[in-house]
Amino acid sequence: MKYFSKTLIVLAAMLAGTAALAQNMVHLNRFSEENAAIEKPADGKPVKGRVVFIGDSITEGWGNQDPDYFIPGKYFERGISGEVTAQMLLRFRVDALALCPSIIVINAGTNDIALNQGDYNEDYTFGNIISMVELAQARKIKVILTTVTPCGAYRWRPEITDSAEKIASLNMRLRKYAIDHKMQFVDYHTFMLGPDGRSMITDYTKDGCHPNIDGYKVMEAQLDKVLK
């Protein structure tokens, strides 16, 4: 019986690993057709004025709600809803580096805090983001780091009661890294934070975490100071 129990545990772990791998493969292929249609220079050097936005549902929703902001042939939205930073890092080469942008805008971390793929560890999340930064810089691509947007509570994770504190801590760490490494840094969080100091301003969100069109306009105003 003990051997049988161990066998079940091993099989369950294998199935979980297979499911995770299958999900990651879906994510890796999500933009394959769009990416293939983009012209890349033969030398692989960054194309001036080409910008890739990589992230999760915050970035994907941006492309859906304000598509006009993403200038055809110039701005490329590569957000996948629900992704954690480890998944973004896994597809960073195919969805960001391979497009030969001159700039990559990274917005990541909220789903890590929301426990979308297991326990949250700030060191791991921060490390995944910095790994993306270092991969881009090795290709002479500039990176714009951005803050995680406010979220006082994840409706799909009501047991998480300290999201605001974790978001603030990660944002502070990203800001310090950007300053120390003389990188561009865009602070969405400050301009979207409500009077309670925890949640997003209600006029800027549909559910407390995801921006609506007004929220994205605030983000655009802050980002454009750097991009334009």
Image: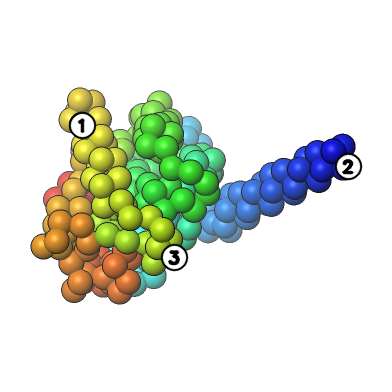
Check whether the beta carbons of the residues at disc 2 and disc 3 lie within 8 A of each other: no
Residue denoted by label 3 = 156
x, y (%) of residue 68? 30, 69
Is 54 on the left-hand or right-hand side of 86? left
Is 35 on the left-hand or right-hand side of 102? right
x, y (%) of residue 133? 37, 33
Picture residue at 49% right of the left edge, 53% below the top = 116
Q: CA distance from mark 2 to mark 3?
A: 38 Å
Q: Is residue 198 above or below residue 5?
A: below
Q: Quadrant of residue 1?
A: top right
Asked if one can make out residue 137 in the rendered structure from this viewpoint, the answer is: yes
x, y (%) of residue 166? 30, 45
| Amino acid beneath label 2 | Met
Q: Nearer the viewer, residue 79 or 115?
A: 115
Q: Nearer the viewer, residue 219 or 139?
A: 219
Q: Quadrant of residue 63?
A: bottom left
Label 2, secondary structure: give it.
loop
x, y (%) of residue 128? 43, 35
| Outermost residue toward the front in this view | 1
Q: Earlier in the sequence, mark 2 or mark 3?
A: 2
Q: CA distance from mark 1 to mark 3?
A: 30 Å
Q: Earlier in the sequence, mark 1 or mark 2?
A: 2
Residue denoted by label 1 = 176
Picture residue at 54% right of the left edge, 56% below the top = 31
Q: Nearer the viewer, residue 47 or 108?
A: 108
Residue denoted by label 2 = 1
| Amino acid beneath label 1 | Lys
Picture residue at 25% right of the left edge, 57% below the top = 150
